[in-house]
Image: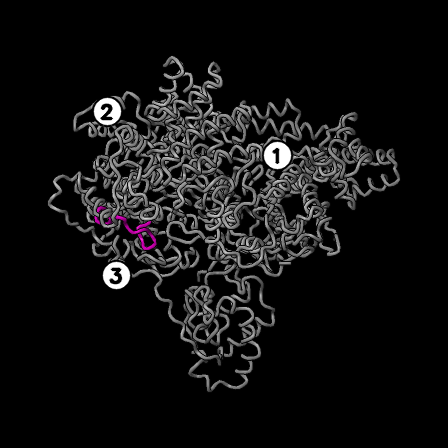
Amino acid sequence: MNPVLHRRHLLGSAALGFGQLAFHSLLNSEKSQAAEPNFGPRAKRVIFLFMKGGPSHIDTFDPKPLLDRDHGKPPPFELPRVTFAKQGNLLKSPWKFRQYGESGLPVSDLFPNVAQCVDDLCILRGVHGTNPAHGGAVLKLHTGSDTFVRPSLGAWVVYGLGSENNNLPSFVTICPTLAHGGVNNWGSAFLPQRCQGTPMGTASTPSKSAQIKFISHPSLSQADQRGQLDFLKQLNGNMAETNPHVEALNARLESYELAYRMQTAMPDAQDLSGESATTMKMYGVDDPVTEDFGRQCLLARRFCERGVRFVQVTHSDTEVQWDQHSNLYQGHTKNAAEVDKPIAGLLKDLKSRGMLEDTLVVWGGEFGRTPTAQGTNGRDHNPHGFTVWMAGGGVKGGMAYGATDDYGYYAARDKMHVHDLHATILHLLGLNHEKLTYRYAGRDFRLTDVHGQVATSILA
Amino acid sequence: MVANRSSTGSGFPASLAVGILGVILLAPLHSSAKESLPAEQVEFFEDKIRPLLVEHCYECHDSQNGKMKGGLALNHPGGILAGGDTGPSLVAGDPEKSLIVEAVRYKNRDLQMPPKTPLPESAVKDLEKWVQMGAPDPRPEIEDHAKPLEGMSAEEGRKFWSFRAPQAPELPDSIEEEADVIDHFVSKKLNESDITAAPQADRETWMRRVTFDLTGLPPTPEEIDQFLADESPKAHEKVVDRLLASPDYGVRWGRHWLDVARYADSNGLDENLTFGNAWKYRDYVINAFNEDKPYDRFLIEQLAGDLIPAPSTDEIVATGFLALGARVLAEKDMEKLEMDVIDEQLDTTGKAFLGLTLGCARCHDHKFDPVSQADYYSMAAIFRNSVNFAESSTGAIHHWYEHDLASKKEKEEFKEIDNEIKEAKKAASSYKSKIEIRMRGEARALAVDYLTACFDFETQDTLETVRAIAKPLGLHPRILFHCRRHLEVNKDTDVFSHWWKYRAANDREGARKFYEDKFMRSTLAFEEQKKADPKKKELEDPELAPYHAALFEKTGFLAVPAKSAHAFTASELAEYDRLQEEARLLESNAPDYPAAMGIADREEIKNTLPIHIRGNHLNLGDHVPRAVPAVFHEKEVSFPEKTSGRLELAKWMASAEHPLTPRVLVNRVWGWHFGTGLVSTTENFGVLGDSPSHPELLDWLSSWFVENGWSIKKLNRLIVLSETYQRSSHPTSPDIASTDPDNRLLSHFPIQRLSAEAIRDSILVVSNRLDSEQGGKTVPLRNRQMVFNHTSKDHTTYESLRRTAYLPVIRNHVYDWLHIYDYPDPTMPTGNRPTTVVAPQALLMLNSPLSIESAAAFSSRIRREADGTTDRIQLAWRLAYGREPNRDEMESALSFINQSPEETEHWDLFCQTLFASNEFIYLR
């Protein structure tokens, strides 16, 4: 190999793998150019529990007594200039809120299990976004832009922090939805390809059978494939040796070896047979209702243990999403029943393994729902005020931060725009959202564009 | 008044001061009047106002600390008075007209400060009072340096290299033929740097290089033999002319342009609707390259083909260029959407044709290039005169505009087809509701059984437990499961509190009797009531009404699961899926209405467009007229009253004297040949772009290109026949890695990885599988059909064996083969694809069906066409690499084959390994 390697040349051609095996130091120097962590990170990795469709904040983590009182009355406030659908009168929550834990934070009856972990939650009640339609809002939440294709949050995190496991992708998204932005929600856009999320299955795949594409050969034995790779090495070696000035040729040799190792690393990460019955039960893998999402959450923990930086777990029912324009009661009951226990299981499990300390868990949907009714028993999209919660990874537990107004329509106090949420997540990972930039087409791009403010009061 | 939207950012409206330019009634009491400020006013300021400003405002509006968000400084009196981007933030003496007061009152949702949390009420009162007093401000005046123009003025811009007309470089007399000019300029630079050029590549290498380069396909062994045997001095030219005349040329070079045009067969972004007519634009581009359509004409057609007098269908189709962008189709705010679309069109047009990042000037003057915000809105004013959306929609999802190409008869026919599809969809949904109605009836009949069965388990019990209880009783497990949860949540209601009492007493019979009685009586009572008044929907009896309501509530304790997979039996589910699938296929396979994506002029033409302050469509500034950017004003362009001005804009861009258009194109072509342009940033010829490695050559080529009728084929020919292009890829200088690591001086030919398309196509060629049919629709969905719904199922398949340029391009879910091999994001214009080496590429080669099946076909081909291991290996080498294997290679191949020479699968594996090898996908 030619000792005089030109760095830029390398970076252009030889960014390896899911990880960054061969040119670790070089990629590190790219990393340091990209981001200089100027404060200690509290979290090393993120699990993002995405509830597709828009769960209602006022029926889950943000109780509104006035809504009960004024049920059925016209809203005593001005509606936004642009709403998704026609708004009716105020609609009270069908669920009761109870106080839990030492913090006494209220959680509705939809989440009795998550409620047990409330002292670990930092409930952000003043979150707001920009776009009242699913597609725009999902993109905004995942990429910071509802106007153009931009790198996703996970891609920025990987770009800033690199990988901890070279045999696995740094950013895995389990059973993501292909609707409403699809790949863009885990894509790298103009960031290096290695930053993009690797999907395991899609929302239409049961998590039990979700796989990374092309991770195994349909019929060839490992030994035969090893023989093939040895032959390939001879073929490739020729061209690589005679062209030492083209580093990509050598990188390709490595990329095949890495792919070969991934074929074992990935099934190993996915193999739940070593998990105890207690663990399986804790995540609800033993129950048909919670099995699918429970498996996703358990996989998330297993990926995190193996150094994956960013794991997204998506609850996106193919028929009944968290999008109750009608039948709020029935739809939310079903969806919450599917995720409540698995999420609580994940939090408890991370905690007992000491992983919650440096794993940031984020829960939320693309927006909340209106306190006004749509039809008789539904709620419309509401990007103006909703709840996202975080746990672990350097945030204060047992805390509610921010508030919506008396009826839960608008964020009103300690407001956090989606950009602020992104800035705060990056901060917790030791990344300054204003310095994590990438130059593309003559401009320095940021996840937070020209916005974003870190919510310092929630930092532990 | 036009308000600023707080929701565009992190809650920070672009500026406090919003387009109110009310008359200032009183001069504020500041600086000059300072000495005469009454003591009590000074005290009030120091006591109440200064602390408030420091605590709540300075974080963002303190010019001394470099914070002037929205252009507003609140740290000195003049700053407050001057206000932010759009004017004064207070009118001394008049709180009602002062934006600072309006903002802190938090009543206007589009103007709220401080952005995160409102001020305490007392602070608001203090501010009001202060403004009422005349805003007395004892702080010293600070000179805020008017922000210097960050970018470049138009005048400065005219001096920047890319905005100057190409210079005619001096050519030495020794150059006799145009063919030598390229080599002259390249050698000149090499000599200056004392680098020796590599010798010419051998003929096999050049043959493979030029064939891939011009057609995207490998040369056949016969073509190679023919060329090697041709000893005439014109042998190279013959090959080049043959390749340029091949229809495969257009597939390869048209595809290059499709990268720039961010071509796709679906919208992607928020909602993924099929661009069922995009293929017409794709075919137009491929044909244009095959016909060698003059580039100036090509440009005009794409920007304004519809405005050419009596346009042909092709010219109308060409305007698809402006319609292909990814749009947020479900955006509720139509005015925002229109401006976003125009931004995308301007940005793409700028990058594609002019190498200008115009999009950067949407919110503020360009930070580097001579493009002001006024220039941006002058250009936007031209595009604002066009229609981008159709009147139809799919629910909340807007449809893009299409040119109607249907005859009257066709219009009628399509109404029928649309109806059929509608009916088929309805058949599926009515089947679903029919079953649900039946299930509800069944559940009601067993209502009491459901309630008593709930005695036997707890809410947290698993569905398995519930199933065991439900089965023997003939109950639906999911309904029972939900029923128990309903009881939990409705503990305190009239209807269900009784259940809890009976359960506490473990009195199952009591519960049964109680509910049987209530349900029975309420049902009978309702029947009676109906006889008397059939219109009444609810039972009026106050005792029984809640029971009746609970029993009939669709989402009550007997709710049928909303998810059909949870509710239906296996056979019902299969039937429902079948009906849905039938409707889907009917739609997918239905013919498309004859139309073409594109844009057209609006009926009402406007001459001006207001500047959108900070890019915000709710914060409008001065109107600017349609114009090209000021930096180009040496040549006046006038815009007609009656048409949008797109045609005039296009003609101006395509004029022979335009400093950018020919340079940008020539540079693209150079980059497509050599892997890197003379200016490596093909979309950016601005200040942050690369400067040309060979400025004289770039200028000479540009002028030559225009003089030669803007012919791209002539340019291709000139380049590939140059010595520079024919050089070996082995550098001669040993220290090249330090002297010219990027090979910008082209001392040798750069080794290039094949594009995703060329890799797949050559696998298909070598394995004899390629289907060479050209043109036509290939996306298996109807125009405007949803590509993805919540099922996240991708119905697009890529089993076709046609050239890759004809595979569907689904935004948001690009075909793996393309995506993994660096296919560009089809929402952004790309002139220069990156080349990465990542492990998923290896997985694709090792494990994908395309690779495995093609290897088997390749293997059977060599076994069929040659006898004996050595001959077969030789043939494989000639097909895969365009050359004979050397001795070492033959040896390793033999030793691999001989592990299992009789086994077909082993030969397949051998062939697959050739696909995976460096030489197969790298061009020397």
x, y percentage for residue A423? 54, 55
Marks 3 and 1 in Cβ contact (< 8 Å): no
- List x then y, in percent, for residue A225: 51, 26
**Residue tagged 1:** A268
Question: Where's residue A381, x and y in %?
Answer: 57, 47
Near mark 2 (Cα within 10 A), the count class, few <14, some 14-19 or many ≥20, is some
Nearer the viewer's eye, disc 3 or disc 1? 1
Q: Which residues are magenta?
A: B684-697
| C-alpha gap between disc 3 and disc 1 | 64 Å
Residue neighbourhood size for the residue with mark 1, other residues' Cα within 10 Å, grouped as few (<14), some (14–19), many (≥20) = few
In-image side of B476 versus A228 (left or right): right
Is any part of residue A137 visible from this angle?
no
Mark 3: which secondary structure? helix
CB under 8 Å between callouts 2 and 3?
A: no
- Report the chain holding disc 2: B
Which mark identifies residue A112?
none
Residue linked to disc 2 = B227
Q: Quadrant of the C terminus of chain B?
A: top left
Occupied quadrant, residue A175: top right
**Three-letter code, disc 2:** Phe
Q: Mark 3 = which residue?
A: B155
